[in-house]
Image: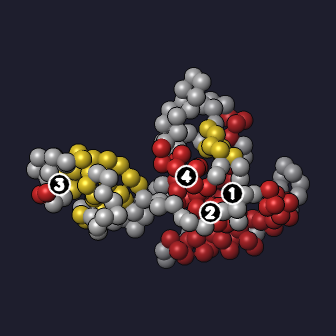
């Protein structure tokens, strides 16, 4: 999964041409905060994603492998079949292009070992049951709140960044976009200007 759940979700849903009514996630921190005895508190950003795309989130039960379905077995299939053939990539875009080609020409044409149907044909039966994909993309940036120190620095993912003096001792919103930019905004003011690039 990419560094944020929103970026990965939008890419996957676009490839599926729709959204399932329910989404089962493993217990990665970007989706599940912890497992409670009666209720699972999901990460607020993941709940934003679920609301925006209209799916109901579910979390796997820890220690109960059967709730995970077959996704982990798929990883075991990708490593020996895709990455053995394609060992070098010019860029992320090149990797994605090769992966899409491999899925289309090989993986989707195989007979699935459990349902004994050609993958692409079986999926065609499921497409009518998907909900329409919301065309408005959710901002995939990592978002956190930080307190600026007295000397004008914030800590983000183990690194210290300086911010403008006017933000000293204030609470700021930090966004890390997929291209690595890190704009910093006074709390609640995103969209009012360009932000302070840290």
Q: For the point 60% across and 24% down, which residue is it?
A: 38
Residue of label 1: 19
Find the residue positioned furthest to the right: 116
Q: Which mark is residue 167?
A: 3
Image quadrant assignment for residue 77: bottom right
Q: What whole-number distance in Å separates the C-alpha atoms at marks 1 and 2?
A: 9 Å
User: Which element is circle 3 on?
Assistant: helix
**Sequence order check, earlier mark of 3 and 1:** 1
Q: For the point 66% across and 62% down, which residue is it?
A: 133
User: Mark 3 and 1 residues: CB-CB less than 8 Å, in contact?
Assistant: no
What x and y, as percent, mark residue 195? 27, 64
**Sequence order check, earlier mark of 1 and 4:** 1
Name the one closer to the observer, 154 or 99.
Answer: 154
Residue of label 2: 134
Q: Which mark is residue 49?
A: 4
What x and y, as percent, mark residue 91? 48, 74
Dot 2 crowding, Cα within 10 Å, few <14, some 14–19, many 20+: some
Dot 3 crowding, Cα within 10 Å, few <14, some 14–19, many 20+: many
User: Which element is circle 2 on?
Assistant: loop
**Sequence order check, earlier mark of 4 and 3:** 4
User: Which element is circle 1 on?
Assistant: loop
**Sequence order check, earlier mark of 4 and 2:** 4
User: Mark 1 and 2 residues: CB-CB less than 8 Å, in contact?
Assistant: yes
**Sequence order check, earlier mark of 1 and 2:** 1
Q: What whole-number distance in Å separates the C-alpha atoms at marks 4 and 3?
A: 30 Å
């Amino acid at each position: 999964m990419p560094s944020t759940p929103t970026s990965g979700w939008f890419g996957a849903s676009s490839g599926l041409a729709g959204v399932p009514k329910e989404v089962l996630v493993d217990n990665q921190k970007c989706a599940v905060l912890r497992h409670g005895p009666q209720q699972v508190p999901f990460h607020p950003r993941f709940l934003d994603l679920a609301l925006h795309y209209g799916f109901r989130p579910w979390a796997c039960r820890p220690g109960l492998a059967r709730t995970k379905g077959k996704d982990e077995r798929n990883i075991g299939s990708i490593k020996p079949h895709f990455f053995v053939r394609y060992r070098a990539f010019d860029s992320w875009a090149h990797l994605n292009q090769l992966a899409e080609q491999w899925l289309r020409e090989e993986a989707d044409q195989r007979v699935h070992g459990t349902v004994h149907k050609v993958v692409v044909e079986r999926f065609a039966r499921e497409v009518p049951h998907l909900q329409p994909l919301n065309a408005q993309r959710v901002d995939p940036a990592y978002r956190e709140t930080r307190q600026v120190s007295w000397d004008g620095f914030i800590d983000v993912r183990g690194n210290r960044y300086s911010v403008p003096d006017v933000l000293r001792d204030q609470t700021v919103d930090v966004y890390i976009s997929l291209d690595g930019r890190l704009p910093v905004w006074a709390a609640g003011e995103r969209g009012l200007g360009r932000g302070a690039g840290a």
